[in-house]
Amino acid sequence: MSLNELTIAEARDRLRAREITATELTDACLSAVEGAGALNAFVHHTPEIARQQAKAADERLASGDAPAMCGIPVGIKDLFCTKGVPSQAASRILEGFRPEYESTITQNLFDAGAVMLGKLNMDEFAMGSSNETSVYGNVVNPWKLDGRQLTPGGSSGGSAAAVAADLCLAATGTDTGGSIRQPAAFTGTVGLKPTYGRVSRWGTIAFASSLDQAGPMTKTVRDAAIMLGAMASVDPKDSTSADRPVEDYEAALTGDIRGKRIGIPREYRMDGMPAEIDALWKQGAAMLRDAGAEIVDISLPHTKYALPAYYVIAPAEASSNLARYDGVRYGRRARLGQGDGITEMYEKTRAEGFGHEVQRRVMIGTYVLSAGFYDAYYNRARKVRALIKRDFDQVFAEGIDTILTPATPSAAFPLGAMTDADPVQMYLNDVFTVTVNLAGLPGLAVPVGLDAQGLPLGLQLIGQPWDEGNLLNHGAVLEQAAGFVAKPERWW
């Protein structure tokens, strides 16, 4: 096994035992990244920073002061601001932007000794489900189907592809409506969206501020627990950061779920659901039942309104957040013609800087916030959101510990398959995930099996607020029962 194929837990143990060095581990990952240009997962390479951080990690390991993430090479999604390193959110409008500050999450990881290999590709401003809206071009899923290139999912497609292809041991992702969990399911990796407020959003380029949440993308559930422990913190710079202690999430992985009650929401059995997704869902429930859990049918009656409510609220918040990009202080500024003034500068800069999908969502968001439509659309969507959260609250109050659902309505689809389709068809990829963001809950995608064509499929577990430890423990039990060990055949 090459060093870059190790999990975080395996690498941690070998680093602490002095069997390998952080420098050796980092060099193995840098070589893997260099040889994987065909995936287009990494868009800004930082080998000098990586080697400096690895050297510092080796010194720290030698002194015996070694947190779990010390010396672990990771990839950072381009949505996180990294000091002195391009941070563009995969958008032309942030061309040349190099922050003078570090996001709280990356600072937490670096404080824990993690090593940054570079910045990872994504959908522009995290708006997309296929990683085809990036200014850098699309990411390619390491899994192939009959020679066809597949989407890795979005928006954290670069993160998912990099982890699946063993270019890094883990990666950061963000999840506004499923952007960690859907790519994880498409690539056979693990993706955790924590409770809203569990990790800081400071220094993370905003899409929809009441929905955005960062989390780990890893090879195993144990790795997700380790990485979340390093990422999470109380942050006075983020008013939505929760003043709660960070648990030892790895210690929560007892493997014992006897007596736990797992809900199966009937509303998630939707018309047209592929038979293999339904079969996998039933198989997952059977695995958890065999581990001692009680499987309970539950109702989340407002689920059918979640997707339309999300696609009102998220664009509305995006239209507000993206108003700050005007070409005045940083990023791209359009070339102006004779007689052009500040209005023309704004118009031309934003027209050149934002891609079509971002423009579409900004226009939708501006429309639903406009006079005469605010109550009809935005306020109504907010009320639906409250009802969706109430559904979950009632189910958890009745003794349900976690909820099991599909993660995606299908396996990864070919690149370009939905590019020219009705955009709503693309948005339907989030049908199982957006409720978690609307309710502010933690959600975990775990790879469980392969479809008939040999592509990975995942299931989603939804937990109670602030109960990531219990959620991860359920995920670890499901992971062990499923025994998913498949890897994409190397072609890149």
Image: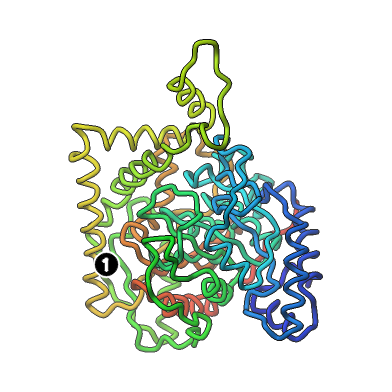
The amino acid type of the residue labelled 1 equals Phe
* Residue 263, x across and y down, in percent: 32, 73
* Residue 246, x across and y down, in percent: 46, 77
Q: How is the image coloured?
A: rainbow
* Residue 429, x across and y down, in percent: 44, 49
Pick the front one: 432 or 67: 67
Residue at image location 66% in from the left, 73% down from the top: 7
Q: Is residue 474 above or below residue 256?
A: above
Secondary structure category for the residue under label 1: helix
* Residue 198, x across and y down, in percent: 42, 68
Circle 1 residue: 392
Q: Is residue 124 above or below residue 51?
A: above
Residue at image location 57% in from the left, 32% down from the top: 332
Residue at image location 41% in from the left, 33% down from the top: 360
Q: Quadrant of residue 442?
A: bottom left
Res 408 visible: yes
Res 287 visible: no
Quadrant containing the N terminus in the rendered view:
bottom right
Q: Is residue 16 above or below residue 183?
A: below
Q: Is residue 356 left or right of residue 77?
A: left
